[in-house]
Amino acid sequence: MLQTTLEKATVNDAEQLTAIMKKTFDFEAEKWLSNRDIIDYNIQPPGYTSIEMTKYMIRELEYFKVMYDGLLVGGIIATISGKSYGRIDRIFIDPEHQGNGIGSTVINLIEKEFPFVRAWDLETSSRQLNNHHFYKKLGYVVTFEGEEEYCFVKHIKQSLQPDSLLTNQNLSYQQFENSDLSHSEYYQVTMEGSSVSNSNVSHIHMSNCNLSHSKFQNINYRKTMFADLNLSDSEFIYVTLSGVQFTDTNLGDIAKPLVFNRCDLTGSKLINCDLKHVEIEKSDTSGMKIDNIPVEELLQLYYQTSKN
């Protein structure tokens, strides 16, 4: 009998895993997206064709490659938050090996890999009706039905519940002052309208959260990582960006241009970037180079030629 196993992925697997992911999700798009102009990020998630995105997920998330009789046939990516909560971010099996029960085995294996997790969340496209049946068969329950996506959760029964667990409590309008909440976990908690000030929240881990319309003011974000975020139409005002790196970043589907206004970008580098239709106006470009050619010399040559 052919055996399905999980192995921790390494960056050396990135190219092969990306190729299988692309093949799988493009196969799903052919099946469920009759109009290829439709954008469905649950079928073709952001960065699914990017080897660099795969390397990021291998480094930062729980990324396992799926082995079927010793052959690499897919992958599963999970985010583990704290001690008790997990999220299946992506699962993909090469279409050539689908129908052999690999997917259901992989779900069971990832749950066994993290036996302390009491709740597993995941999302899938509303269009992928076979996924709905698949997850329900494995014990997942629908928590949200939308036009674009379905959300599922599976609660794993533990023999012993932690003494520190508070569930179904209404703590609205409470005030906590000079309190120690270190290493606490919050899952499916409503904190809308809450305020946190003059507090130590270093090393906090937030995943799959809705932070829309939030404000972050006078915050120390040194050595913080922001990854796999949607920051469309956001504003960064009076922000210090010393040493910050923007990698594998784009302007999204609407492609609204970035605007840097009154910014000091001395010594910055733009490498291997698409700069079509970029405009630079009323800016100090002294020392600036394009392909190692000084911009000042290019401008002088242009002005000299235009006068002749």
Image (spheres, rainbow, N blue to C red):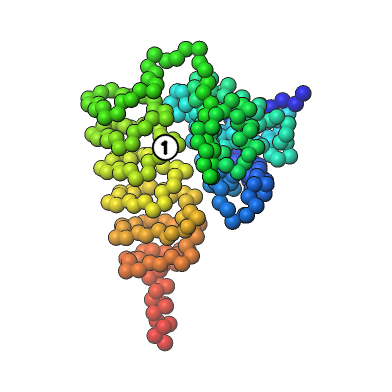
159 horizontally vs 205: left or right: right
Quadrant position of residue 200: top left
Quadrant location of the N terminus?
A: top right
Looking at the picture, tell me which residue is in the foreground, 147 or 303: 147
The kind of secondary structure element at disc 1 is loop
Location of residue 153 with respect to 295 vertically, above or below = above
The number of numbered discs placed on residues in the rendered structure image is 1
The residue that appears at 27% across and 43% down in the rendered structure is 217
User: Where residue 16 sits in the image (x, y, percent)?
Assistant: 65, 41
The residue that appears at 33% across and 40% down in the rendered structure is 222
Location of residue 282 with respect to 95 vertically, above or below = below
User: Where residue 246 sits in the image (x, y, percent)?
Assistant: 43, 50
| Kind of residue sitting beneath label 1 | Cys
Query: From where the camera sits, is residue 190 visible?
Result: yes
Looking at the picture, tell me which residue is in the foreground, 193 or 227: 193
Residue for badge 1: 209
101 horizontally vs 151: left or right: right
Query: How many C-alpha atoms fall within 10 Å of the one at disc 1: few (<14), some, or many (≥20)?
Result: few
Looking at the picture, tell me which residue is in the foreground, 63 or 288: 63
The residue at the far right in this view is: 1
The residue that appears at 50% across and 32% down in the rendered structure is 143
Quadrant position of residue 28: top right
User: Where residue 274 sits in the image (x, y, percent)?
Assistant: 50, 60
Location of residue 21 with respect to 103 vertically, above or below = below
Quadrant location of the C terminus?
A: bottom left
The residue that appears at 43% across and 82% down in the rendered structure is 305
The residue at the far bottom in this view is: 308
